[in-house]
Image (tube, grey):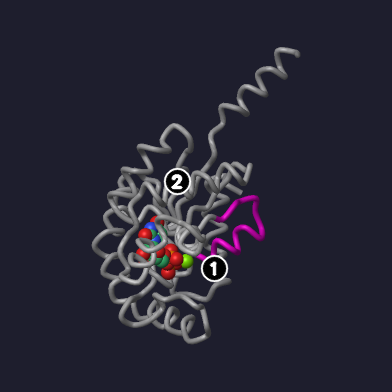
């Protein structure tokens, strides 16, 4: 092997997976915009909520009931469970650029991620979709009425999900703002307009 090939192989091995966290209130548009990004760019979309719903539905899962309760109550699953699901999905994808949607949602998620992943992945950016509670609530209730099948797309669960967002997730968003990793996006607008903003940000950061 030439020195050049050796160095290239070495640097590829040493390049950690690149992560973009995607945060925002329930219904702020995280899932929609992640799907748009995946369509145009080489990212893998991992929704923490979807991974938890999958684990909940897995026959024999020891966490199924606990996850079900957390989702219905709008509270947050212990990070050991969520982070392990994320890490496994990252490994199984065999890819290196990830959009992690709906995580980290609280202090426990943040410290757990740092403990488990800080030398295994680089958090490059945090996208935060800003959207009024009124618009978000309407979107989730419409999504529920249209048959999302989600047990938490109802007025009662939504109220709790918003409380969790304001009390637990906002401090995480502020944490990333201090680290200058946060990019805020106006999520009240139509999906296409929001996506233009998303693209501009990713391009500026050389992520796409
Ligand atoms: N959830 C969690 N930890 C996570 C992500 C989600 O505990 O890291 C739970 C939490 O109860 C949340 C629910 O899953 O209210 C639904 O999350 P999802 O991201 O699907 O909701 P969204 O924000 O997209 O509406
Ligand atoms: Mg979602």
Task: Specify whether residue 186 is in view.
Answer: no
Q: Residue at x 52, y 76 (%)?
A: 190
Looking at the rendered image, the quarter that the N terminus falls into is top right
In-front residue for pair 185/72: 72
In reply to whether residue 94 is colored magenta, the answer given is: no
Q: Residues within 10 Å of mark 2 (few under 14, many from 20)?
A: some
Task: Specify start and end residues of the magenta stretch as a single range.
Answer: 31-45
Q: Which residue is mark 1?
A: 32
Quadrant observed for ligand 1 in the rendered image: bottom left
Q: Which mark is residue 96?
A: none
Q: Mainly helix, strand or loop, the magenta region? A: helix
Query: Mark 1 or 2, which is nearer the eye?
Result: 2
Q: Residues within 10 Å of mark 1 (few under 14, many from 20)?
A: few
Q: Which residue is mark 2?
A: 84
In-front residue for pair 190/109: 109
Q: Position of residue 68 (x, y in %)?
A: 38, 67
Sequence-wise, the earlier of marks 1 and 2 is: 1
Q: Position of residue 159 (x, y in %)?
A: 29, 76
């Amino acid at each position: 092997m030439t020195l050049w090939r050796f160095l290239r192989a070495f640097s590829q091995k040493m390049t950690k997976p690149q992560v973009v966290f995607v945060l925002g209130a329930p219904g702020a548009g995280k899932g929609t915009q992640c799907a748009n990004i995946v369509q145009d760019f080489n990212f893998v979309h991992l929704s923490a909520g979807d991974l938890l719903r999958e684990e909940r539905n897995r026959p024999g899962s020891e966490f199924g009931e606990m996850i079900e309760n957390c989702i219905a109550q709008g509270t947050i699953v212990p990070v050991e469970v969520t982070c392990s699901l994320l890490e496994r999905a990252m490994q199984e994808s065999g890819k290196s650029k990830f959009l992690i949607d709906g995580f980290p949602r609280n202090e426990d998620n943040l410290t757990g991620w740092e403990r488990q992943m800080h030398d295994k992945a680089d958090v490059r950016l945090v996208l935060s979709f800003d959207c009024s509670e009124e618009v978000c609530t309407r979107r989730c209730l419409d999504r529920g009425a249209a048959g999302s099948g989600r047990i938490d797309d109802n007025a009662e669960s939504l109220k709790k999900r918003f409380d969790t967002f304001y009390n637990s997730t906002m401090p995480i968003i502020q944490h990333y703002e201090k680290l200058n990793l946060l990019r805020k996006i106006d999520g009240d607008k139509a999906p296409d307009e929001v996506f233009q903003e998303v693209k501009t940000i990713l391009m500026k950061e050389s992520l796409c």
